[in-house]
Image (cartoon, rainbow, N blue to C red):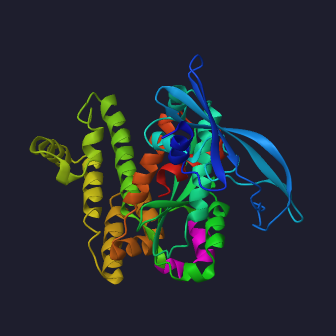
Amino acid sequence: MRDRDLYATILGLEAPWKVVDVDLDAKLELVAVKVDAEGRSALVCPECGKPCPGYDTRHRRWRHLDTCQYQTILEAEVPRVKCPEHGVRQVNVPWAEPGSPFTALYEALIIDWLKEATTSAIARQLDLTWDQVDGVMQRAVTRGLVRRKPRDLFAIGVDETSFQKRHEYVTVVTDLETSDVIYVADHRRKSSLDGFYKAEGKERLADLEIVSMDMSKPYIASTREHVPEADRKIAFDRFHVAKALGDAVNKVRREEHKALQAMGDHSLTRTRHLFLRRGESLDEEQKGVVEILRKMGLKTGRAWMLKEAATKLWSYVRPGNAKRAWKKWIGWAMRSRIEPMKAAARMIRDHLWGIANAVTKGVSNALSESINAKIQKVKKMACGFRNRDRFRTAILFHCGG
C-alpha cells in the first residue's frame, strides 16, 4: 500500500477529498500529509447547507495523531463559499471540527487524557498550550450540550459549590435519576435557579416530583415561583438537617469545654469528633466515654442525645406521622434549655413541611453532595479557577454525562 493510500485509509477520507502528497522531514521529525478536493465538487454553505459558488481557498493545518515518534500535520487548501444569506464562509472538512487546530482523532486523544489529568499536565506532555487543551474541552462540552436530548425530569437536586474563597459560589442542578449535572449558573441567588426553570418551561416542570435542596431561601423562592405545587415537591434532605444538628452539638461542646477548662476540668478535651459521630458508628470504648460524660449531667451529653434521637425520625411513610414525630422532638429540644439546640429546633420547625417531604419520599441529597465532592476534586486538580466560564465548562465536562 502506498503512503498516500495508507494515510487516506487511516484518515477515513472519502470523495471528493484525497491525499495528494506525504512529505517526511526526518530532521524535524515531522510528517506532512497534504489533502485536496478532487475536481470541482459542489460546495455548500456550512450555516444553511445551500449550494453556493466558490469564493477562494485558505491554507489550513491540523495536528493529527503522531506517526510513530514523528509529529503528523494535515494540510489542505480549504475552499470558502459566498452565501447570499451568511456571506463568506469556510466549508466544513470531514476530519476536524470548525475552528479546531486539531483533527477529530487528535481531539479524541486529548479528551481521553482530560478525564485523567489536568489541563496543564496534558499541555506539557503533548507539547501544546494551555489554551489549546482548554479549547478542546470547551468544544467537547458545546457538542455535548447541542446533542443532549430533552429529558423527562422526575427528581432533581439543587446545591451550591464554592468557586473561590470569600463566599464565591455557583449553583449546580443534578438529575437525581441519571447522576448528570444538567445546569450550572453563577452565584447562589434566586436568579441563578430561575434561569434553569425558565429554560425547562412550565409543561416539563409540571412533571417534576422531587426538588431536593438545602434550606436556602433563594432556592425555595425560585422553586415556589416556577414549579407547580412546589411545597409538596421541595425536600430538605437529611444531610443538611444532620449538619445543622451536628453544628449545634459542637457549639454546645465548645462553650461548655471553655467553661469547664476555666475551672480546671478537662473532661471534654479531644471529644469534638466523638460527639459529631453517630452513635451506631462508635466502638465500645467510645460509647463508654459518651455514657460517662452523659451521666455527668453535661449539656453536651444531652445535646448529643437530642441529635441521636433525630436520626431515628427518617423512616416514616406517611407525612402526618412524620410531622407528629418531628413536632414531639422539637418540643423536647425547646424544653432542653440548651440554646444552640433550641435554635436548631426552630430552624427545623420552620422547614418541617420540606423535611416531612424528604422523609416520606425517601429523598437524599447524597448524590448532589457526591457530585459536589467530585467538582471540588476537579477544582483541586486544576489548582483553582479564576474564570467562572471555565469552571462551568469543567463541571459539565466531568459531571455532565
Q: Is residue 35 left or right of residue 350?
A: right
Q: Is residue 56 visible?
A: yes
The correct choice, above or below, for 323 with respect to 108 in the image is below
Q: Is residue 168 visible?
A: no
Q: Is residue 350 left or right of residue 166?
A: left
Q: Residue at (78%, 50%) from the top-left corner?
A: 79
**Can you tell which quarter of the image residue 84 is in?**
bottom right
The correct choice, above or below, for 200 with respect to 2 in the image is below
The secondary structure that most of the magenta stretch takes on is helix
Q: Residue at (53%, 37%) from the top-left corner?
A: 3
Q: Is residue 291 left or right of residue 364?
A: left
Task: Locate residue 124, reporting x and y percent.
Answer: 53, 26
Query: Is 219 in the magenta?
Result: yes
Task: Locate residue 379, reporting x and y percent.
Answer: 51, 39
Residue placed furthest toward the front: 1
The correct choice, above or below, for 275 with respect to 194 in the image is above
